[in-house]
Image (tube, rainbow, N blue to C red):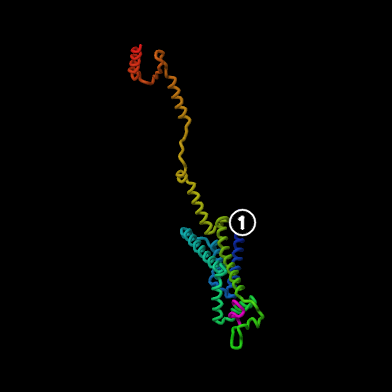
Amino acid sequence: MSRSRASTRLVTAVVVLVLLTLTIVAAIALHQIQSLSLPIPKTTGIATLLLPLLTGLTLYPSSPTPASKKGFQPYLTLTIFTLLTIYETVLITLSLTSMLPPSSLTCPLEQRWQGLYSAKNAESIKRIQDRHDCCGLHSVRDRAWPFPAKRRLVTACASTFKRERSCFGLWRGNEQVTARLLLVVAAGTILIKMSLLLFVRPRTPWTEQYRRNTTAEDEADDSPSASRGQRRIEPQYHDEEAEEVVDRAHDTENDRTITPGNDRVEDPAMQPSSFQGHSEKRERERNEWA
């Protein structure tokens, strides 16, 4: 019992530590989305940040289920499992669209930068340029900050800060790294859930329902009715019946006698009247030939 409790505590500590790590990773990704104005929806970052928390609450509920609601527990468990799986799948899909292929990221980045430039959002563009020590999107003259004015040229950023590279490649790299972080969080929660279901199996709503379903299937496969339908019916051999048949045949052979006159085997089990006509006919044929 002590070993079981110790292992349960160890598994719980590991799961909590991993979920906490995934929460920190999701927080870093959300910070990247906001600070660098990446073309990744903030709702995706917030949903990813909440995912480890929801997974932990689902795997380790704080209060037991009342007895009056135990009948609905399997349906509730299945519903939560389905919704959480869909939730994780959507996040993984959104993360992949912000990673691959790199050529598909050009249009969202272009639209995002143009929106910042049209809105004269100097703070966001300046933060991106300062982060990567760059100017403009595709070149140092392409919609860079400081914005052009009557007494300010489009090369004001490059001439003022002595920068010679654009921001597109580095900014796209930030988007791909952030998308990978979101993907790690979503995939990590799935791996934790599946590991607990298939290997550790603590008593949680997921694992308890999985254990009951597996046990029910095993009992159904091992039931006599199921095995009777798959078992081939084979004839049974009885030694007593075989010995009785052999003895009967042996007695029949011993009862047979040979008549000296005509070398004919007679069987006392047969009726004499059945051979009388046949014997007279054979005797008559012998006399005619003689």
Residue in the picture at 52% in, 54% down: 211
Q: Is residue 263 visible?
A: yes
Kind of residue indicated by mark 1? Ser
Residue in the picture at 54% in, 59% down: 204
**On the image, numbered disc 1 is attached to which residue?**
7
Depicted 254 relative to depicted 128: above or below: above
Question: Which of 108 and 266 lies nearest the eye of the viewer?
Answer: 108
Q: Is residue 141 magenta?
A: yes
Left or right: where 222 falls relative to 160: left
Q: Is residue 31 visible?
A: no
Depicted 155 relative to depicted 217: above or below: below
Residue in the picture at 47% in, 27% down: 243
Q: Which type of secondary structure does the marked residue at label 1 adopt?
A: helix
Question: Which of 200 and 121 lies nearest the eye of the viewer?
Answer: 121
Residue 226 percent location from the top left of the image: 46, 46
Question: Which quarter of the image is occupied by the C terminus?
Answer: top left
Residue in the picture at 44% in, 21% down: 253
Q: Is residue 207 magenta?
A: no
Question: Which of 163 and 70 lies nearest the eye of the viewer?
Answer: 163
Residue 40 percent location from the top left of the image: 55, 72
The boundaries of the magenta stretch are: 137-145
Residue 264 percent location from the top left of the image: 40, 17
Dominant SS in magenta = loop
Residue 9 percent location from the top left of the image: 61, 59
Left or right: where 269 falls relative to 28: left
